[in-house]
Amino acid sequence: MTNQFKSTQRLWRTARVGGFLFLLLAIGYAQEPKQTLVPAPGGVVVRLTPTPGNFHTPSIAIDPSNAQNLLVGFQAKASVAYSRDGGVHWTLSPEIAPIDYRSTGDTSVAFDHRGRAFLCFIAHDGPGPFKYWGHNPKRNAILIRRSLDGGKTWEARTISVIEHAEAPGIPFEDKPYLLADNHPTSDFAGNLYVGWSQDGMKEALILLSRSTDGGLTWSAPVRISDQPGLPRDDNGTVEGFHGVVAPDGTLHVVFSDTNHIEYAVSRDGGKSFSRNRSIANTAPSHFVVQNVAEANGYPQIGMAADSKGGHPRLYVTWSDYRNGDVDIFCISSADEGRHWGSPVRVNTDPVHNASDQLFQWLAVDPTSGSVNVVFYDRRRDPANRSVEVVLARSSDGARSFRNYLLSEHSFDPLGSSIGEYTGLAASNGRVFATWTEILPNAQVSGGGRSRPASAIQVGIADFRTAPGSEEDR
């Protein structure tokens, strides 16, 4: 009995010590991530949509002729908000979505060098079946709206980039992205470009159209993707077009192709493109994350001019789950895309911590050359459900990143859609992010069912005078 009693005591002491250590580890796990994020300097968050609704998939642009002028596009219906005071106050433009289409969305916005504002979006009466959008869709189009006063008023005319009347075998045009050549040194200054995914019955392609007259007319599409993708909107397709224009007018573009990021260049104003080249191996670009209706890791490309007159440096960001949970990555090129470095992890939480970071967007500050990336972040929720919005910033050519908390509070996506992307723009040390936030205890109705309501938020960070910030070094 004595030996048994002593053994029991040893087991109890071991259990108590083990439990105490487990408790310490649990407390450390819960507290440690909270110590890794500091608020963004000068951080301010403004809600653009005061009434709860089904809002998501925002984009944002800064007027290159006046950095106080900002524009945000978002959906469910294609919508716009503008600011004339650097993001302090915002005004929603009157409804500008066409009434002769059942649905609009996938918005992107841009300013040209004259301060004119443009909204690009898709419009359709219905896609094909779920994930197989190109299988007998109804009529659909990529459309443009113009504003000659920076977003305050919009022309009545809706301009077609490409449009299909309802007929057997038409494709479905998806996920367009709009960009402008605003470089005075460019041979193609003033050009506008729209790239997108064309989903067909048998394959998917990346296409591009250009405008040389301020968005009034658009060229016939040219094909960018050398190899077609699979026809299903999932792993295996080609999707996620993004581009940036160099000071000499060279157009650099990227898109996702299953486990690769493809890169191509146009040196003739978007009339033709180089052969595609794979510049990064990735995990699949489509993936499932907990508590969110959909997710992807499509790439973006940005550029910083060389202050010494050399080649501009290119940057590409994306997200994938090579580490089990979803992380954000960045690569760069110092020789106009000929060679690319190894991926750098943008989010600074511990690797393999089962916390997802997703829906990143990239903006390179043309003044300071800093690299900015915004994304939803779950590092501070051990259950990997609630998200916050984090801004990552690099001032050393994307060799390392600092992470800042941008949102004012976390929110639970509640299994609903938080869009297909976020938005980011930067100029002169100020960074402007836009994202979707799911609202607690609010519902909206549509399509015969109720869903969690959402709002569009804009977060602003100011690195110009922050003590110890990159601009002060």
Image (spheres, rainbow, N blue to C red):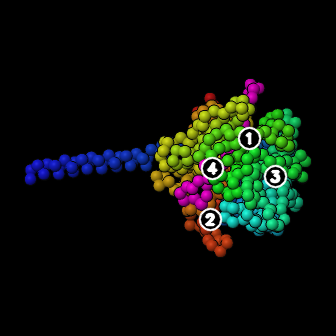
Which span is picked out in magenta? Answer: 284-311
Report crowding for label 2: few under 14, some 14 to 19, many 20 or more residues within 10 A (C-alpha): many
Asked whether 299 falls inside the magenta stretch, the response is: yes
Where residue 453 is drawn, which disc sits there? 2
Q: Amino acid at mark 1?
A: Asn
Badge 2 or badge 4: first in the primary sequence: 4
Asked whether the beta carbons under mark 1 and mark 2 sit within 8 Å of each other, the answer is no
Look at mark 3 in the image and give the residue it sits on. Answer: 118
Select label 4 or label 3 by which is in front.
Answer: 4
Q: Could you say where residue 417 lies in the image, as x and y percent from the top left?
A: 62, 60
Look at mark 1 in the image and give the residue it sits on. Answer: 276
SS under mark 1: loop
The residue lying at 72 percent from left, 34 percent from top is 337
Q: CA distance from mark 3 to mark 1?
A: 29 Å
Badge 1 or badge 4: first in the primary sequence: 1
User: Between 398 and 208, which is closer to the camera in this rendering?
Assistant: 208
SS under mark 4: loop
Q: Could you say where residue 83 lies in the image, as x and y percent from the top left?
A: 75, 51
Q: Amino acid at mark 4?
A: Ser
Badge 3 or badge 1: first in the primary sequence: 3
Image quadrant in which you'd find residue 154: bottom right
Q: Could you say where residue 204 lies in the image, as x and y percent from the top left?
A: 73, 54
Select label 2 or label 4 by which is in front.
Answer: 4
Q: CA distance from mark 3 to mark 2?
A: 27 Å
Q: Is residue 209 left or right of residue 294?
A: right
Q: CA distance from mark 2 to mark 4?
A: 27 Å
